[in-house]
Amino acid sequence: MKILLLETATDICSVALGAEALLIAQAENLQAMQHAAVLTRLIEATLEQAGLRVADLDAVALSSGPGSYTSLRVGASTAKGISYALNKPIIAIPTLQGLAWGAREKHPGAWYLPMIDARRQEVWMALYDENLVEQQAAQALILEDNALENWLLQHVPGFPETPVVLCGNGVPKVGAPYPAGLSDSGIHTCSATHLPALAHAAFLSGNFVDTAYFEPNYLKAPNITVSKQPILVKK
């Protein structure tokens, strides 16, 4: 079983290839917000590493948000193009779950709080237990005063005795020193390398999305600036 894995939710553009839940190839671009320009090239490079053609794929999986509106659309459009062209299913993996999986690989036996920068002092975050079962769905939190510690006390049974591990590019907003029971995984970037096992499990359970109607989880409307220049109308 060979699954192409796309991660475009944040400023990192990452592609990987999984086979039977194992990572067999990867290619990433660390330059911010170059997704539309580099994604197809990264896919070609990943397939070349594995000695495969796009027709050899069994499915395509993508990080489905939350994240950047434009970046998520690039990933979704690419996944849909492959799905339509080859009649292959699409697997959508929550971006925050992918981060939690990466954190668990380094720090097993805890609960996981992935968070993505959502501008200013706000983050998007979700809560997963030690088995990566979602305990709190993706939501926004403004990191003011003791908001995070109070949130953890409310939603994590036994906190701070139950350890919670942070991950994602929103972690620097929390700032050290951390409250008791909270630690940093060191996993701050989204990566397609976090997705093979999750995509494999979804494939086996037949957990696919409808190619025609799938939309990423933007969680927030795009930040669109309206021009202040007057509109000129020809007479």
Image (cartoon, grey):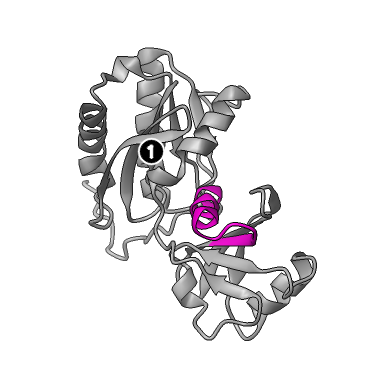
In percent of width and height, residue 216 lies at 50, 41
Q: Is residue 89 left or right of residue 56?
A: right
Of residues 192 and 89, the one drawn nearer to the viewer in this rendering: 192
Can residue 209 be seen from the camera position used here?
A: no
In percent of width and height, residue 160 lies at 72, 75
In percent of width and height, residue 77 lies at 37, 32
In percent of width and height, residue 119 lies at 45, 69
Of residues 224 and 21, the one drawn nearer to the viewer in this rendering: 21
Image quarter hosting the N terminus: top left
Q: For the point 26% across and 21% down, which residue is it?
A: 52
**Quadrant of residue 36 in the image?**
top left
**Quadrant of residue 209 in the image?**
top right
Q: Is residue 86 left or right of residue 124?
A: left
Q: Per the image, is 63 magenta?
A: no
Q: For the point 36% across and 22% down, which residue is it?
A: 82
Of residues 234 and 4, the one drawn nearer to the viewer in this rendering: 4
Rendered position, 11 above or below 118: above
Of residues 59 and 33, the one drawn nearer to the viewer in this rendering: 59
Q: For the point 49% across and 58% down, which residue is it?
A: 106
Q: For the point 76% across and 65% down, which residue is it?
A: 155
How many circles with numbers are drawn on the protein?
A: 1
Question: Could you classify mark 1 by the number of other residues whose Cα lies within 10 Å: few (under 14), some (14-19), or many (20 or more)?
Answer: many
Rendered position, 43 above or below 123: above
Can residue 194 be seen from the camera position used here?
A: yes
Q: Is residue 87 left or right of residue 130?
A: left
> Label 1 belongs to which residue?
6
Give the structural element (helix, strand or loop) at label 1.
strand
Q: Which residues are magenta?
A: 96-114
Task: Name the amino acid type tagged 1.
Answer: Leu
Q: Per the image, is 106 magenta?
A: yes
Rendered position, 109 above or below 199: below
